[in-house]
Image (cartoon, rainbow, N blue to C red):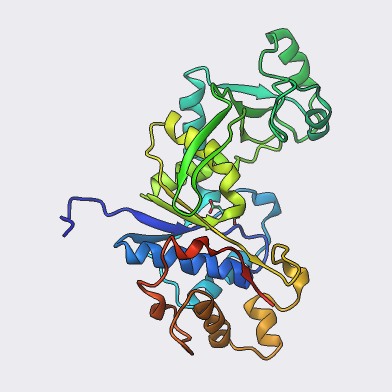
Amino acid sequence: MTSPSTPRGAGRYAPSPSGDLHLGNLRTAVIAWLLARDSGRAFRMRVDDLDTARARPGVAERQLADLAAIGIDWDGDIMWESERFPAYAAAADQLADRGLVYECYCSRREIAEAPRAPHSPPGSYPGTCRNLPESERARRRTALGPGRVPALRLRAEVTELTITDRVHGAYTGVVDDVVLRRGDGVWAYNLAVVVDDAAQGVDQVVRGEDLLSSTPRQAYLADLLGLARPEYVHVPLAVNAAGERLAKRDGAVTLADLAEAGTTTRAAVARIVASLGGPEGSDSIHDLRGRVTFEALRSGPWEFT
Ligand code: GLU
């Protein structure tokens, strides 16, 4: 038994409020909830609304209502990233104090067109602004367009890192000079996720495997900030009949679309439950308790047709 003084850890789900959740997203949330509850962890909810300028009213509320409608519950208050900017600034300051942050003035295009070292990994930052003299920095700072601030980048001291994932095993991925704050002033997801998981006591991160490749960067940031790396569980995504990642264009994929097409929420939950090996005919995610293993999650994507 866990004594009351021992924090029991937590899992979480952290939707970005960019649109309604589809059944693949909801299924990932169910897996996160199950693995947390089955391991005696708390379950936290967090809204990834970092980009306040692009937030659309009501989207997060609909996502939360859909998560509740399929039976997911969570502990404590919902964390809204839009209220957490001081915490991200404090983390960036902590890194800056150690000389690990520099300003970057590059546009996306400049990054894409910059000359690269022969073996630099695709998509990694080519290091253009890493070692600029102060005079050049001052010139580039004043040349930034309206509404732009210098981006902040991490001065990474490694180029790759190996993390352990419960589904994928050892995974080695790129660590580059990751953006901490974007040129439009928005705090970067990779920093926010690390700071907020720690603040919510999250020690188990369950999410779609599209985020596996970002994980070494996040683990590196956690190490630098003196935060324990959580357990990582990257789960296969839902795909359409063509094997492509499920998306809005695939038709009735959200609870609202399905309702319009005559499918109830209970029937939608039944599909998720069946896809995870639940008992025949069940439409309750509680019937999945104890049934979803890391091993079972290695069986590949969920074909949603
Ligand atoms: N908000 C991210 C997304 O919806 C997920 C973040 C995470 O789980 O780390 O893709």
Name the residue: 68% across, 61% down: 56
Residue drawn 81% across the image and 32% down it: 112
The spot of residue 101 in percent (x, y) is 57, 23
* Position of residue 301 in the picture relative to residue 199 (left or right): right
Q: Percent position (x, y) of residue 61?
A: 57, 68
Residue 131 location (% of width, % of height): 67, 13
Q: In which quadrant of the rendered view does residue 117 lie?
A: top right
* Quarter occupied by residue 139: top right
Q: Quadrant of the N terminus?
A: bottom left
Taking the image as drawn, is residue 7 in sight? yes
- How many marks are shown on the rendered structure? 0
| Whether residue 291 is situated above or below residue 82 in the rendered picture | below
Position of residue 126 relative to residue 43, above or below, is: above
Q: Position of 40 compared to 244: left or right? A: left
Ligand 1 shown in quarter: bottom right
Q: Is residue 85 left or right of residue 127?
A: left
Q: Quadrant of residue 111?
A: top right
Let me know if residue 21 appears in the view: no
- Residue found at x 53% / y 87%: 266
Q: Nearer the viewer, residue 242 or 64?
A: 242
Q: Nearer the viewer, residue 6 or 215?
A: 215
Q: Position of residue 127 (x, y in %)?
A: 69, 21
From the viewer's perspective, is 106 left or right of 15? right
Residue at the (37%, 74%) spot, across then down: 289
Q: Quadrant of the C terminus?
A: bottom right
